[in-house]
Amino acid sequence: MKKWIALFMGLLLVFSFTACGNTSPSNASQTESSAEEQETSQTETPTAATSATETSATETTEAEVSESELPSDLETEPETGKTLVVYFSATGNTEGAANYIAAATDADAFELEPKDPYTDADLDWTDDNSRVVYEHDNPDARDIELVAATVPDWESYDTVFIGYPIWWGIAAWPVDSFVKANDFTGKTVVPFCTSSSSGLGESGELLAELTGTGDWLEGKRFSSGVTEDAVQTWIEELGL
């Protein structure tokens, strides 16, 4: 009897071990599968985030490039339609008239200065040996070199007043050097002069012939002691 009981207990133990052995591989397989799924999920998530980051960076770079490629002239428009008063003044009379014109038209002013300035003795037209008399009698000597014959930002000016004293019925010749050095195409040019008695004469027309460009108006002669009111009235009559 005891032998049968022992044999029965042995068989029971064998069946128990067999059941455990069959269950363990299944659990291990499920554990490994779960681990693989976790690794796959973790691997795929950073890949999606990286893709989104790269797309955002690409879009930012394209926006920056697009902005950098904008033409610079769209950012700052050059100023045009300005007025300039250019003048040569031997004794200060023309300078006074020029300043009045500049104030009345809100214009820039540009003084023509000979590199070899005229002295009071040079300007004595009653002295046959003076510089101006010599230059008048010798036209080749009238090519006066200026400190500056061109104006910065010249293209921005649409209207140019040109002033000078009258010498022997024509414009003082230092002005010739400026007129010949510049292109007045597309500009309205208004000559004006100062004198004690002489009129404007053909001085404006002669200057226009020297350059051959620009729309030259008739111009105005002022007395040596011209007043600001007189200049203001003339500017209003021009209607520029």
Image (cartoon, rainbow, N blue to C red):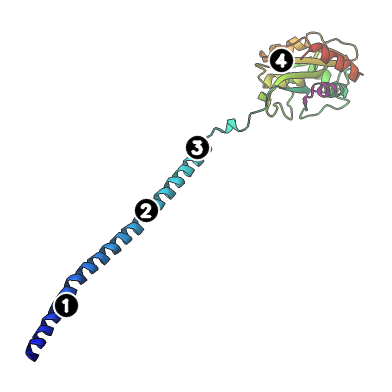
**Left or right for 234, reference 67:** right
Toward the viewer: 211 or 60? Answer: 60
Amino acid type indicated by mark 4: Thr
Q: CA distance from mark 2 to mark 1?
A: 48 Å
Amino acid type indicated by mark 1: Ser
Q: Which residue is mark 4?
A: 188
The span shown in magenta is 100-112
Q: Position of residue 53 (x, y in %)?
A: 44, 50
Numbered tag placed on residue 16 in the rendering: 1
Residue at far front of view: 1
Count of numbered circles in the view: 4
Q: Residues within 10 Å of mark 3 (few under 14, many from 20)?
A: few
Q: Which residue is mark 3?
A: 66
N-terminal of the two: label 4 or label 3? 3
Q: Is residue 167 visible?
A: no
Numbered tag placed on residue 47 in the rendering: 2
Residue depicted at 10% across the width and 83% down the height? 8
Say whether residue 102 is magenta.
yes
N-terminal of the two: label 1 or label 3? 1
Numbered tag placed on residue 87 in the rendering: none
Q: Is residue 29 visible?
A: yes
Quadrant assignment for the C terminus? top right
